[in-house]
Image (tube, rainbow, N blue to C red):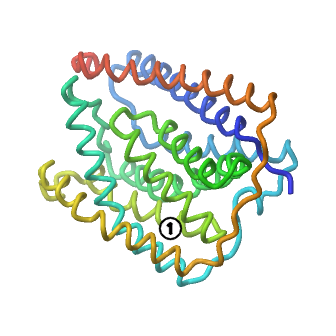
Amino acid sequence: MRRPYAWEGILIVFVFLLFLIGLNLLVGLIQGAVQEPLSLSPILIIGELLILGVVAAWSAFRRLSWRETFYLNKTSWSMIGLSILVAVTWWPVATGLGTLMEQLFSLIGPPPEIPPPRNTLDAIGYVIAIVILAPLCEEPVFRGFIMRGWLRHGLAAGVMGSGILFAFQHAQLSGTVPLSLVGVMLGIIVFRAGSLWPAVVIHALYNGLTVPFLVIPEAMPDISDAALMIAGAAAVPLAAASLWLFHRQAPPLQLPDKEPLTTEQRIAIMITLLLMLGVFSVIILLEVVIRLNPQLVGS
């Protein structure tokens, strides 16, 4: 079976981060010209469709099997049911960890605020982008194309490489650690199930539990950071148990064939990694500047 290479996954994230920088510059110019903030939902929708479109086009160019590359295999209803359990138990863990990380980075300054929907149509766009398109677009990219490439070098490289790149793609300072953890968990889910669909379900439910706090924050309960962190710590045993149960009910484990890294592959990984980390560092530096100077957002 033809498979992607690890460096191709890094290159995909590099290109997407470049797109984020360019899009932010363009939005800033347009907002300055019209003197009012733009709706965020169209930007989110375009971003999700773009990353999947680029990977699909590259896969077609490489003549990769979409079914094999993206793990588009059938799965059982029991796996789907266990996926729901994993999503519900992992959400407080990731949320609590994200809250803890934000507590640390808030010492620099407040985080850039995500603008709430401007109207009902914008709110619907948020839901479509975050709950529907994000799972359907990001999972084939990260737990399909990218993980397939990193699995050339073993199971640990596959799930960790794709999970960390998943966090980098979101370009959030406080989200890097919790999103890496979620990405690794989703990689384990896909590899054990042999199918992408359980991860799509988990991703959709995870985002679905989060999106009301963004779309209708006034209707949501006011939960303190301390409560979120305590709930996250308390949910760790349940999250571990749900993942173990999924592992026990999944098909028999078949470890991937491990390939040695050639000199050319090492060089390609190093170059693409340096490029990606360079762009990621620029984005994080901009976030630090905004944290230190929150008045810049409104200017």
Say few, some or many: other residues with alpha carbon within 10 Å of mark 1 (under 14 / 14 to 19 / 20 or more): many
Q: Position of residue 276 (x, y in %)?
A: 58, 26
Please, is residue 115 above or below residue 200 in the view? above
Callout 1 secondary element: helix
Q: Residue at x 75, y 52 (%)?
A: 258
The quarter of the picture where residue 290 lies is top left
The front one of 259 and 123 is: 259
Q: Position of residue 12 (x, y in %)?
A: 66, 36
Q: Residue at x 41, y 69 (%)?
A: 86
Horizontally, residue 227 falls left or right of residue 91, namely left
Type of amino acid under label 1: Val
Q: Residue at x 37, y 47 (%)?
A: 178
Q: Quick one: quadrant of the N terminus?
A: bottom right
Q: Quick one: quadrant of the C terminus?
A: top left
Q: Position of residue 69 (x, y in %)?
A: 75, 56
Horizontally, residue 282 falls left or right of residue 157, namely left
Please, is residue 83 above or below residue 32 in the view? below
Q: Circle 1 sits on which residue?
A: 201
The front one of 50 and 259 is: 259
- Counting every numbered tag in the picture gives 1
The quarter of the picture where residue 270 lies is top right
The front one of 109 and 211 is: 109
